[in-house]
Structures are given as C-alpha cells and as structure tokens.
Amino acid sequence: MRRASLISVPYLWLVALFLVPFLIVLKISLSDTALAIPPYAPTLDLNQGWAGVRAWLDGLDMENFVFLTEDNLYWKAYLSSLKIALFSTLLTLLVGYPIAYGMARAPDEWRPTLMMLVILPFWTSFLIRVYSWKAILSQEGFLNQFLLWLGVINDPLTILNTNIAVYIGIVYTYLPFMVLPIYAALEKLDASLLEAAEDLGCSRTSAFWLVTIPLSKQGIVAGSFLVFIPAMGEFVIPALLGGSKTLMIGKVLWEEFFSNRDWPVASAVAVILLLLLIVPIILFQRNQEKQREADQ
C-alpha cells in the first residue's frame, strides 16, 4: 500500500494536469466553430441526461482534421517547425558540447562556479531574455554597431525578423538544457580510459572521437531531446525575433486561438502537434531508462 500510494501521486498529477486537459482539447477539436461562448458547438448539457450526452456525441466529427490536410498552411508549418527544431538542436549541440567538455575538464574548485554561470540565465524572465535580443540584433542594435565599429561591415546587417534570429534565440534559450546533461555524462568519465587509449597509440583527437564521444552519448541524446521537444512548439521566440516569413506551428496555433478564435481548428493543430512529439518523448524516456540501468 505504501508503494502504491507513492506511485499514485505522480500518476494522479499526470492525469489531472495532462490527460484531462488533453481530453478537453481533443473534444474541442471534434467540435465545430460557433458564434457563442465558448466559441464551439456542441456543448455537453448534463441537465438533459443521456439524451444530452447522445446529442453531444452525434455532433462530434473529424472535419477539422480533414481541413488541416487540405490547407497547405498547416503541413508547411509542421515541416518548417521540424526543420527549425532539428537545425537548432544541431547548433545547440555544436555550441554546448565544447562548453560542457570544458566544464568537465576544469579544476574541481571551478566547476560549481561554471555550473552557476550556465544556469544563471534562468534567474531572469524568459520573456525578458528573448526580448533583449531585439535590441541586440536590430539594425541599430549592439551587434551591428560593434561590427561597424570594427570595420567588418559597411552597412548594418538585417538579422532581426529572419530565421537566423530565431536560431540564435533558440540556441541561446535552450543551451543550458544541452550543456547540463552532457556535463553530467562527461563528469563521470574515467580519465584513465583516455590515458589507456593514448598508451595504445591513439592521438588525443582519436581518443576524443573513439572514447569520449561514445561514453557521452547518453548526455548528447538527453540534451538533444530536451532542446528539440520544446523548440518544436516554440511560440515566443519566433513571435518576437522571427518575421512574417517565419512559419512555425506555435505561431499558427496562437493565431487560430486568439486572432481567428477558431478553437476547434486550433485544438486539432495542438492534438497533431502532441502526437508528433509523442515519438521523441517515448525515445527520451527509453534513453533515460537505459541510462539508469547503466548507472546501476
């Protein structure tokens, strides 16, 4: 009973804060748009008893999901979000791995300080941190002024309101999620394995690719999933830093809910997005289970 009660707490939490909201969104996605409050029909009226339930079930349909397949905007938004999320994850890995490697190879007394510097941005509001990049990347911003002062460029660069600005925002925002898992894997790396590889004839570069990278694979996989999953549905970064040509499913979702007030279509978009993210979430959970088994 004690074990069951402990296990039931997180499951009840998931049911209350994930499953129930998902079922509500799924129900709305099967409804039709209506000029009412709430802006969809049919609504469930329990005062009519079983007849009200039957009338509610009869009014549900799959028209919104069919509409998503017929309109090019939505599948293009999904593909664009997938491309941006994948490329951003790769960039974050290329930037984050050297940082994590340097932290793991730093003296022990410096590691807590370096760890604090990595998580320090979390002490500031996410919205403020992203919005500050508008002042940095604009044509009159710090970056262009600095490059003009160095003489690297003659005219200000157009970075803001482009996909490049979105990549910069995602890499900056989610970099700690990449660094911390890789650092945790590299910190546990036995240095004697590298010495043994070098004694057997490997150069430092070869030892890095043949020993360090494979032994840090679990951290790389975990960090990549932690970046890819939220980046796929990102809204704030493309809304603030991306332009009108930046097409991501998060922006489409926001516009359908709050601009068009088409809750059924927006709910259908959200359901499909969640179904697409289930695959990497399951893979991430399996990776975590394998890591726990390896640690044991």
Image (tube, rainbow, N blue to C red):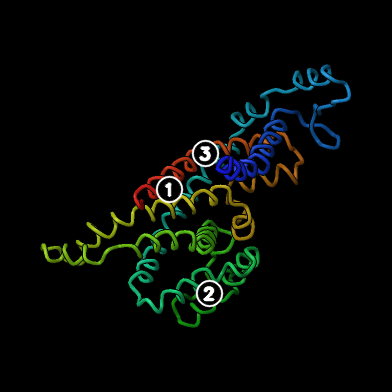
Closer to the N terminus: mark 1 or mark 2? 2
Are dots 3 and 1 in contact, CB under 8 Å? no
Q: Residues within 10 Å of mark 2 (few under 14, many from 20)?
A: some
Are dots 1 and 2 in contact, CB under 8 Å? no
Q: Which residue is mark 2?
A: 143
Q: Nearer the viewer, residue 74 or 31?
A: 31
The residue at the point 16 percent across, 64 percent down is 196
Q: Tell me the SS state at disc 1.
A: helix
Which residue is most to the bottom?
149
Q: Quadrant of residue 220?
A: bottom left
Residue 47: x %, y % from top left: 88, 25
Residue 116: x %, y % from top left: 50, 73
- The amino acid marked with disc number 1 is Gln
Closer to the N terminus: mark 3 or mark 1? 3
Closer to the N terminus: mark 2 or mark 3? 2
Q: Is residue 246 left or right of residue 63?
A: left
Number of the label disc, if any, that sits on residue 288? 1
Q: Which residue is mark 3?
A: 278
Which residue is most to the front?
1
Q: Is residue 60 left or right of residue 112?
A: right
- The amino acid marked with disc number 2 is Leu
